[in-house]
Amino acid sequence: MVVNKKIRELQEKRKQILLGGGEQAIEKQKAMGKRTARERIMALLDKDSFIEYDLFVEHDARDFDMDKKSLPSDGVIIGSGTIYGAPVGIYAQDFTVAGGSLGQMHSRKITKIMDHALKMRMPLIGINDSGGARIQEGVNSLAGYGEIFFRNTISSGIIPQISVILGPCAGGAVYSPALTDFVFVVDKISKMFITGPEVIKTVLGEEISMEDLGGARVHSEITGNAHFFAASEDECFEQIKRLVTFIPWNNSRKAKSFEPGEPDRKYDPEKIVPDDPTLPYDVRDVIRSVADNSDFFEIMELYAKNIVIGFGRMGGRTTGFVANQPLEMAGVLDVDSSDKAARFIRYCDAFNIPIITLVDLPGYLPGVDQEHAGVIRHGAKVLYAYSEATVPKITLILRKAYGGGYIAMSSRHLRADFVFAWPGAEIAVMGPEGAANIIFRKEIMSSDDPEETRKEKIGEYKAKFANPYVAAARGYVDAVIEPRETRRFLLHGILASENKVVKVLDKKHGLPPF
Amino acid sequence: MKKTENLGILNINTILYKTRLSPKFINRNVYKPTDPKMIMSYLPGTILDILVKEEQHVRKGEHLVILDAMKMQNIMKCDIDGIIMKIHVKKGDKVSKGTVLMEFK
């Protein structure tokens, strides 16, 4: 029958294209510990949910004998499917086809799925594995990158955008992931840099390996370009799937609710935090002591560890947690931790996720390097992000909240909806030692025993001001609570602000200090 | 307990905190004021030409070195009046950012 012949023809065509760059290239890909582009999509999406678009797209380059070359699907796979039932648009560059290089049609496929995801208001996932621009296609290839960056930008804050770096992503190509919300990297597989080791060696004479220049660890620990670090592709896909459960499909929705469960009793809030404000503890244990099922999904775990960010659930609802981490650098705010927190606060605000802030910080990190690195400008991002955010903001002061750090960490003055404090909270203009040295300077200097007087005055100041009651007396703190009451009060905050409405002044956009 | 291993002391406004110190903090660049008598390359590149000699008197604004860097021939000018004590590089040398090229008396 004629129809059967046509169907067989289609099957034959598909079979040919599905081989990508051919068996040899696939073997090479696997030898590097990498999956093929199609395998990656299948591993990430719900079984049988993937529908591919543009399988038959071909390039139309003419120069440099390109007209004699056929590149199956032009080196990129696009389509949509679901993750735990949530719709996603996805593209995956196919390194086995011309090194996943980006030519005009390759980029048009990517922008097609980007337009689709934006129009359909679904998250977009981009799997990057590409040698870069397809040099033979010249400026058309650059145009392609520009079209992608533009779409990343206009989609920002409307649909969640996730980048997965599973191979090289170098030169201009790095700017697409950098414009998206979350970047996932895998140890020994991901490589990101603007200029590679060879150029650096030629120009500067500095020798460095790709791994040390822009490997997964570097971007997770040093640059902060990556948000999630995994040891293998499989682990990476599990992280992505878990993230998708915490975020909404788009900015006009809320994240899906889950059946809430009580926190694990082994996290006892009364026992986690030492009384002495100079002693460390792991603030993640405090988060686990209040979050549903003690489940906390940390973001940027390896970068600027002095602040902790991530998602948990309160009463089944996705909640963003921001917490100073006294275990690392005493929990100070500095350039890196300010950037990390501010971006996360803005993410939560864009996607209707309430924010719980746990405060315990000594202030800002002193140092020439910090001042010269622009800690003023970077620190200002935290103030901007909290002030700008209109999602429910609930603040809990665990221990120290001194000076500018107190203001910055979602204080009442930046329009926190609820501010609670534990009885051990010290809400003051600065630490008792510093304050006593200034206020009682004359008494201390003129004393027969200055050390003794200093100690006395520090004690006096501590007793009077290093507590939550001065702030509570002004209404800056809504309630001083016992640690064991914490979950109850935080849940109240989340539930009471379920229908929060804030009118924002009309403007084109603000000018955050970035 | 593993979580309290490797604790150091961090001084914030005269209060000493027991905490872990980050590698970035430990390896931070210690500040050194710039010395106008040391001429340093402000870009990594190659010395294309040296336009002065040791013991030469030079005036503010005079050309000292042509540095080939970032696809440009960059002329390095003198910031002060003075006598050149020592020239540390020669034509063709590759220098990184911050390399001392010459010193003034």
Image (cartoon, helix red, strand yellow):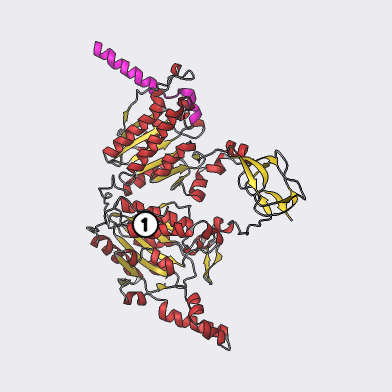
Q: Is mark 1 on a helix, strand or loop?
A: helix
Q: Which of A256 and A352 is in front in this view?
A: A352
- Examine the structure image and report whether residue A310 is included in the region drawn in magenta: no
User: Residue A452, how many percent across, how many down?
Assistant: 55, 85
Chain bearing tag 1 is: A
**Could you tell me residue A290's position as x and y percent?**
34, 62
Region rendered in magenta: A1-29
Question: Going by the image, does A429 lie left or right of A86?
Answer: right
**Is A27 colored magenta in this rendering?**
yes
Q: Say if residue A170 shows up in the picture.
A: no
Question: Magenta: predominant secondary structure element?
Answer: helix
Residue A389 is situated, as x and y percent measured from the top left of the image, at 32, 57
Q: Can residue B73 be seen in this view?
A: yes
Q: Please name whichever residue, A274 or A369, is drawn nearer the observer in this view of the structure.
A: A369
The answer to whether A242 is drawn above or below residue A295 in the figure is above
Amino acid type, residue under disc 1 in the picture: Ala
